[in-house]
Image (cartoon, rainbow, N blue to C red):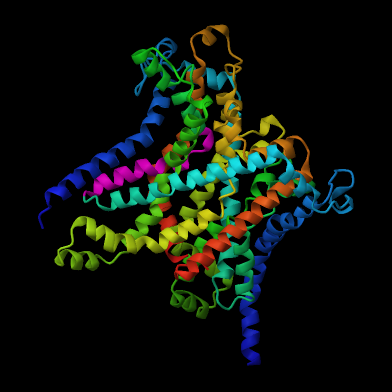
Amino acid sequence: MHNSARRRFKQNMPLLLMFIPGALFYLVFKYTPMAGVVIAFKDYNLYDGIIRSPWVGLSNFRFIFSNGQLTDIIMNTLWLSLLRLLVGFPFPILLALLLNEVRKTWFKRSVQTLVFLPHFFSWVIVGGIVLTLFSQESGSLNGLLERWFGVTYSFLYHVPSWVAIFLGSGVWKEAGFSAIIYLAALAAIDPSLYEAAAIDGATKWRQIWHVTLPGISTVVSMMLILSMGSIMEVSFDQIYMLGNPAVSSISEVISIWVYQLGLQGGQFSITTAMGLFESVVGLALIVTANGIARRMGKELW
Amino acid sequence: MRASAGEKVFYAANYILLSIAGMLCFLPLLHIFATSFSDAGMIMSGRVSLWPVQWSGDAYKALFLGTRIVEAFGNSVTITVVGILLSVTGSIAVAYPLSKEYFYCRRLLSLLILFTMIFGGGLIPNYLLVKSLGLIDTYWALWLPGLISTYNMWVMKTFFQNVPRELEDAARIDGCGELRLIRSIVIPVSLPMIVAIALFYGVTYWNNFFNVLIYMNDTSKYNLAVLVQQMIFSASNPKLAIEPDLQSSITAEAVKSAGVLVMVAPVMVVYPFVQKHFVKGVMIGSLKG
């Protein structure tokens, strides 16, 4: 007994040494910022620093929720990301289902190569492409409209068309790559299930309904739980590239506001409070979603 | 088995839909390519769609001579190459111990690490931390906070767990130390997965926009993402330090498109070779995680 403990210690020594830099990384760059959220409860100023700045209790939070402009920003964030989830979630599943029905390998592989591609582009690139296509003065789409109908439309300066572009660009960038995970789940379905269904006289549609969809339901629920955690987040990069003053009534979201007021305006306490609110809601949502999934036996942890 | 009429329609529609989806992903890029290589007059009159009209390299000439894009390209390469080396090493160093069931406090440490995936301090505390460590205007502000992506590390850990025990045991009996074991057994066996993870990190570093924007005040430290972004989104034409002759033979559209293309070119060149690794990486992460 004593011997095996010593053996285990000997085995652990190199592992522990190896683990030290990583442990420091998590301690310094993950857990220290978590402790840094105390400034959400303080009136932080650079001169006094985090420790000596005076406590102000919940007043930063009270300010956020009583300020109409800020509640608007929170609602914008929520709306945009709910829309993104609603519109964006089904596309990868649909794409994977369609790809799964393709028999010709070369065709499947070519389509995959093309639809995965946009995932590897930065939002800077996607923003550039959006401008090239949709801007009023020089956009290609307006060029066509001008030639065919003699009119142009400022797609990026009207809220409905801007939201459509926001959602469309997200689908364009990520739908293909997100399909991989469903393709993997589809590939793992036992082919004999399809054979059995076919022998029983099930049509293509019934096979998809009774074999394919149940086969990927675990992965679907897993992805749904994970996406719950980001319901309070709208990507800074995407809005920074696509947003503009004309549509700020919808495009002003938490991440942009924190950047502008916090990093550019030096208002650290109030923006940290907003960030903390965002993180806590995200955590609560993901834990709740996991709890619901647990009832159905599909929990993530 | 013969396909019914309904199924035939389904298959035909499927091929058409997927072809459209594939084209939609590629055509915008082709348009950017065409614009960047076309003659200014043709672009202005809207005659450029998917292939260059009256080939011209002037936009690139203006871009390379008139902006700091070469410097930014070099910075992007530095950030990416060093970043990959640090992140892959860092991730292995955490993933390997966690993959051993005899590692002390393995469960607790795993939980503490996974928790950081669903909760974090937010932007401002991170920024203040980086600032107080004196990392502003150094690339360490990108490398250190981005050292380990917990998701990537967890994919590695899962993979290491599935390396056959017999391989390691045999090496240990031969008197192999832990480090040599990792170097000569574990890493070679897991190489395809490590390549995939390295590429994931590479793409993240190459496309890094936000962190460069907030941590680099010195404009000579900008990477391509920030430089190209400022070029594309400046309301006026890009400021170019070039002679008037060249100035008159280019349009802002073409120069902006050229900038976009310079930034995606390396990704496009590497992509076909590494695509299967990417796919494999995601699959390992999704199925065994």
Instruction: Give the vertical position of A21 relative to A104 (above or below).
Output: below
Q: Nearer the viewer, residue B203 or A249?
A: A249
Task: Assess whether residue A123 is covered by the magenta stretch.
Answer: yes
Q: Identify which residue is drawn at 28% across, 67% down.
A: A190
Q: Main secondary structure of the magenta part?
A: helix
Residue A233 visible to the viewer: yes
Q: Identify which residue is drawn at 66% across, 71% down.
A: A16
Q: Nearer the viewer, residue A8 or B44?
A: B44
> In the image, is B113 to the left or to the right of A38?
left
Q: Position of residue A110 (x, y in %)?
A: 30, 43
Q: Tell me the magenta residue range.
A: A104-125
Q: Position of residue B165 (x, y in %)?
A: 46, 76
Q: Position of residue A20 (x, y in %)?
A: 68, 65
In the picture, the quarter occupied by the N terminus of chain B is bottom left
Instruction: Examine the image and state in which quarter residue A141 appears.
Output: top left
> In the image, is B221 to the left or to the right of A266?
left
Q: Nearer the viewer, residue B253 or A15?
A: B253
Task: Assess whether residue B188 is covered by the magenta stretch.
Answer: no
Q: Determine the residue located farthest toward the bottom in the rendered image.
A: A1
Residue B215 visible to the viewer: no
Instruction: Examine the image and state in which quarter residue A30 appears.
Output: bottom right
Instruction: Give the vertical position of A55 relative to A250 (above or below).
Output: below
Q: Position of residue B223 (x, y in %)?
A: 60, 34
Count up the numbered dots. 0
